[in-house]
Image: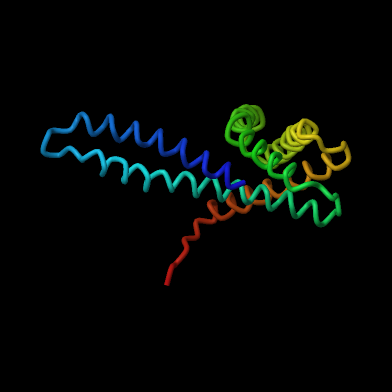
């Protein structure tokens, strides 16, 4: 899991470093940053996407671990980590495309949530089979993780639509 976070950080760092370096080359001589400052700024800015993706990854892993404990599936932690990483990749790639297609076909109604839940169960089921879970364990894990993700999305949507703003004391 730590290796995954380090890889995410390194990829973020390299992409941000390239972006800042190119932008810095276009600046006038008196506004240019030194190479050390470019690297330090890139190191600091790379923390934001790493923390965000790490939080999502830990949420998925926690959901999978919760399902494992509740249903006494006795899954290995290595398999759960691989499953969580695979689901994270799916959620940020294919799932976005599926969401657009489903929203175009059924709109943003109750049917949208149901179809997205079923499509995620299907996708997570196949991911679990590829990782090496048994069919029953895969179905239980896929359903549990998909339901948890759907609940989190619905809570976010209800909070967003209610228009309540948090007041920080």
Q: Is residue 14 left or right of residue 25?
A: right
Q: Is residue 1 left or right of residue 142?
A: left
In this view, the residue in front, 54 or 152, is 54
In this view, the residue in front, 43 or 98, is 43
Where's residue 80, x and y in %? Answer: 73, 44
Where's residue 68, x and y in %? Answer: 80, 51
The quadrant holding residue 128 is top right
Q: Can residue 79 be seen at all in this image of the molecule? A: yes
Q: Which residue is located at x 69 percent, y 37 percent?
A: 116
Q: Is residue 65 left or right of residue 72?
A: left
Where's residue 85, x and y in %? Answer: 64, 39
- Asked if 120 appears above or below 75 in the picture, the reply is above
> Is the C terminus in the top left, top right, bottom left or bottom right quadrant?
bottom left
- Asked if 162 appears above or below 5 in the picture, the reply is below
* Color theme of the render: rainbow
Q: Which residue is located at x 41 percent, y 39 percent?
A: 13
In this view, the residue in front, 145 or 18, is 18
Where's residue 56, x and y in %? Answer: 58, 47
Query: In this figure, what is the number of numbered marks?
Result: 0
Going by the picture, which residue comes out furthest to the left?
30
Q: Which residue is located at x 82 percent, y 38 percent?
A: 133
Q: Can residue 104 be seen at all in this image of the molecule? A: no
């Amino acid at each position: 899991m730590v290796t995954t976070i380090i890889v995410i950080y390194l990829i973020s760092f390299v992409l941000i470093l390239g972006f800042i370096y190119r932008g810095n080359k276009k600046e006038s001589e008196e506004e240019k940053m030194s190479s050390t400052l470019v690297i330090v700024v890139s190191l600091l800015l790379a923390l934001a996407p790493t923390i965000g993706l790490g939080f999502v990854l830990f949420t998925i892993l926690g959901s999978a671990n919760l399902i494992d404990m509740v249903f006494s599936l006795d899954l290995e932690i290595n398999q759960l980590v691989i499953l969580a990483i695979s689901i994270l990749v799916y959620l940020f790639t294919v799932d976005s495309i599926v969401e657009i297609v489903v929203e175009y076909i059924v709109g943003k109604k109750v049917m949208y949530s149901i179809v997205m839940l079923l499509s995620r169960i299907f996708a997570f089921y196949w991911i679990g089979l590829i990782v090496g879970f048994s069919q029953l364990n895969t179905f239980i894990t896929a359903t549990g993780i998909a339901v948890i993700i759907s609940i989190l999305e619905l809570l976010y949507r209800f909070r967003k639509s209610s228009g309540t703003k948090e007041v920080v004391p």
